[in-house]
């Protein structure tokens, strides 16, 4: 009897040990929640949210290209830019532009707050498994990435932080904090993974600054991020510089970059006007950009009522540009330094300046951080930075947090062209990046235009899901990609 009792006890203890070890194994298999934070236009914003009058606000409030072309008065004045025989009526041009943007619902209030009744209608703290209609048919951009991550990680483990991307980035980060807390409570997870796309990278940088000591993020993945600024926002500081050479180079570069999509059509139409007419337009615009009276009117009568009160756009201004831009903008009445809007953008400016310090703080605590920046297109030809490499929107040097990048069409020379962090095409030296061992570059891939099912989208998803540790050696071993990668028109990837 005693022997049988001993056997029974041994059996029970063994069973308990097996069950305990099995539960530990299951716990190890639990997948950490991934939260994707989109950028500008990543989710629609609406007016009269939640009512029968709910209506989507078109991105930047201008509607589609066709809607703009229907504005015959504006188009008539704009077409004069293509002629060297007809003087441009600047008063009429400003008036027509003003009439088009005046009262548009996209702009925020003068104090920088989103207008009452506006916002998103898809704020969910439940996983993507509950919202399959949101992502299952997605073909590109952030939604395509969500789709790939869901397929790879399980939709029940993936979340989308949908927010009104026009608002102050600090407010978006506060909202993200509440979102993270809700996800942790729902799942029981101690930590989450944050993936910030484009402007979402700025939200992540702000989250780092405010909540890094909460220790609730295991990985930060920045995809084509704006946390270090976008040079085209120099226009907010009244910097305009336009040349025929840069305009033509930009049109060629963008047409090639958008191969395989419907986007090249409008670019081909512009190029069909001929280099001569485009050149004339560039020369006319160059003259206008030097006309201080015109720029002042353009800023105050067109840009201000159109997008001038949107905090997030102001906050995309690079740190080193901020002071001079604010000085010029306030001098002509384009920015009121006594306003709440200015308080918002100045606060984010200081946060932007602490990004390097915040990253170092987290790295010391073993938090994984990676950056993926694209390159291969010429800068937008409206400022002095038109010679930069960009991804169609964000300058590669900014998105990578400090890479040394040759001017578009040029190669690095001398010491800058040597070392293990130099791209095979001699365009980028990643040694000067904030994170030289965990920053990757993809050539010839348009800003956030990742397409579902492609190697490019799967690479981002693999990084988000932690298929490899965030360092060059691990990613090369596990995923097969080096620091510098080229994309073809089908978004197949090859090492450079």
Image: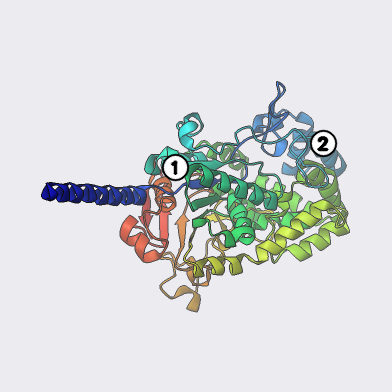
Label 2: how many Cα within 10 Å (few below 14, some 14–19, many 20+): some
- Residue 20, horizontal then vertical, whole percent: 30, 50
Q: Which residue is mark 2?
A: 102
Residue 78 position (above or below residue 243): above
Q: Quadrant of residue 451?
A: top left
Q: Is residue 182 above or below residue 422?
A: above
Label 1 crowd (10 A; few <14 / some 14-19 / many >=20): many
Nearest to the observer: residue 428 or residue 463:
463
The answer to whether one can see residue 141 in this image is no
Residue 317 horizontal/vertical position (percent): 69, 58
Q: Position of residue 44 (x, y in %)?
A: 63, 35
Of pointers 1 and 2, the one earlier in the residue sequence: 2
Q: Which residue is mark 1?
A: 157
Residue closest to the eye, 45 or 17: 17
Q: Mark 1 to mark 2: distance in Å?
A: 43 Å
Label 1 or label 2, whichever lies nearer to me, is 1
Farthest residue to the top: give it: 52
Residue 11 position (above or below residue 317): above
Report whether 280 appears left or right of 24: right
Task: Specify whether residue 250 is in view.
Answer: yes
């Amino acid at each position: 009897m005693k022997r049988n009792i001993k056997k029974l006890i041994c059996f029970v203890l063994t069973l308990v040990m097996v069950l305990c070890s099995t539960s530990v194994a299951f716990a190890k298999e639990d997948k950490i929640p991934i939260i994707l934070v989109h950028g500008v236009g990543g989710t629609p914003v609406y007016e009269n949210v939640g009512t029968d009058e709910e209506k989507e606000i078109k991105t930047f409030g201008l509607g589609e290209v066709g809607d703009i072309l229907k504005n015959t008065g504006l188009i008539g004045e704009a077409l004069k830019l293509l002629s060297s025989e007809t003087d441009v009526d600047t008063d009429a041009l400003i008036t027509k532009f003003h009439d088009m943007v005046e009262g548009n619902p996209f702009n925020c209030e003068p104090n920088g707050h989103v207008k009452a009744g506006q916002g998103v209608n898809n704020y969910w703290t439940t996983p993507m498994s509950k919202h399959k209609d949101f992502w299952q048919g997605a073909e590109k951009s952030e939604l395509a990435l969500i789709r790939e991550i869901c397929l790879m990680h399980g939709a029940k483990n993936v979340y989308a932080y949908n927010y009104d991307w026009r608002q102050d980035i600090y407010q978006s980060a506060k909202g993200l904090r509440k979102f993270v807390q809700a996800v942790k409570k729902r799942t029981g997870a101690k930590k989450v993974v944050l993936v910030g796309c484009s402007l979402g990278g700025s939200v992540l940088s702000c989250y780092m600054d405010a909540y890094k000591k909460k220790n609730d993020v295991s990985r930060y993945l920045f995809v084509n991020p704006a946390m270090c600024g976008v040079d085209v926002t120099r226009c907010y500081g009244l910097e305009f510089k336009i040349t025929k050479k840069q305009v033509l180079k930009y049109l060629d570069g963008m047409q090639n970059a958008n191969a395989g999509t419907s986007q090249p059509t409008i670019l081909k139409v512009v190029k069909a006007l001929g280099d001569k007419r485009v050149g004339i337009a560039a020369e006319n615009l160059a003259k206008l950009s030097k006309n201080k009276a015109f720029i002042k009117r353009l800023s105050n009568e067109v840009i201000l009522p159109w997008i001038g009160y949107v905090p997030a756009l102001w906050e995309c201004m690079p740190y080193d540009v901020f002071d001079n831009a604010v000085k010029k903008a306030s001098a002509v009445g384009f920015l009121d330094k006594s306003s709440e809007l200015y308080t918002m953008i100045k606060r984010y400016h200081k946060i932007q300046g602490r990004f390097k310090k915040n990253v170092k703080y987290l790295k010391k605590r073993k938090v994984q951080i990676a950056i993926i920046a694209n390159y291969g297109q010429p800068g937008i030809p409206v400022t002095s930075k038109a010679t930069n490499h960009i991804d169609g929107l964000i300058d590669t040097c900014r998105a990578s947090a400090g890479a040394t990048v040759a001017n578009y069409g040029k190669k690095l020379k001398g010491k800058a062209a040597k070392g293990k962090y130099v791209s095979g095409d001699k365009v980028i030296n990643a040694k000067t990046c904030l994170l030289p061992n965990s920053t990757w570059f993809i050539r010839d891939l348009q800003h956030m235009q990742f397409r579902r099912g492609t190697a490019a989208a799967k690479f981002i998803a693999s990084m988000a899901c932690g298929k490899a540790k965030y360092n060059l050696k691990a990613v090369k071993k596990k995923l097969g990609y080096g620091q510098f990668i080229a994309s073809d028109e089908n978004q197949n990837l090859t090492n450079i």
